[in-house]
Amino acid sequence: MRRVPQIAALAGLSLSLMGSATPRRTHTLPDDEAILARFEEMVSVDLACARLAVEHGQSKEVRDFAAMLVREHEMARQMARDIAAQIHLRPKPSSNPPGQAEHERIVKELRGRPDIAFDVLFVRHEIEYHKALLNAINTEWLPAAQHADLSALFGQVVPAFETHSRMAQELAQRLGPRK
């Protein structure tokens, strides 16, 4: 059937999005403003996908998972904004965030999926997204964070993001391979 190759292609797109969304190692570590900006960019990207899944998810389980992601990622984003204000940091957003084009493509692909393939693609995206986000936090941002409040933020959000990742993996198993 045509759906299997389409789902595989969409999953590959999701993987390419996450691969390019992961910050690349450079010789210089990002400063706190850059870390906060990148954190907000990544959380905002996922919020857009989760909001789409709340509206278009085929199963109640996927819609509920997406609604939880919206609530918790909005809280994480607000926590980051509050910390930035408290410690007088002005996040420096990049003019061309890594992964932006891929994000726009995956949102377009999700919008074009009116069936269970939407759920499968969304959940696969969430697995890869959370893997990339946790990798960025643990290998780039946390080691580079200069302000204790920023490190504390990551200490607070990492367990939730790990739970989201585990939940997405469990949900993918329940959805199983769809043809």
Image: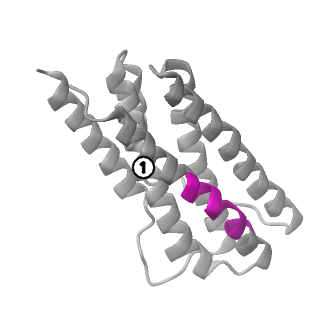
Q: In which quadrant of the rendered image does the C terminus lie?
A: top left
The answer to whether residue 104 is above or below residue 166 is above
Residue 86 in the image, given as x and y percentages of width and height: 88, 64
Q: Is residue 100 visible?
A: no
**Please, which residue is most extreme toward the bottom here?**
27
Side of 70 relative to 121 (left or right): right
| Residue type highlighted by circle 1 | Ile
Could you tell me which residue is drawn at 43 percent across and 61 percent down?
A: 22
104 or 125, nearer to the observer: 125
Describe the element under mark 1 as helix, strand or loop.
Answer: helix
164 or 20, nearer to the observer: 164
Could you tell me which residue is drawn at 15 percent across and 31 percent down?
A: 5
Side of 133 relative to 26 (left or right): right
134 falls in the magenta region:
no
The answer to whether residue 123 is above or below residue 150 is above
82 or 165, nearer to the observer: 165
Neighbour class for label 1 at 10 Å: few (<14), some, many (≥20)? Answer: many
Residue 104 in the image, given as x and y percentages of width and height: 42, 35
Which region shows up in magenta? 153-163
The answer to whether residue 72 is above or below residue 86 is above
159 falls in the magenta region:
yes
Q: Is residue 178 visible?
A: yes
Residue labelled with disc 1: 127
37 or 67, nearer to the observer: 67
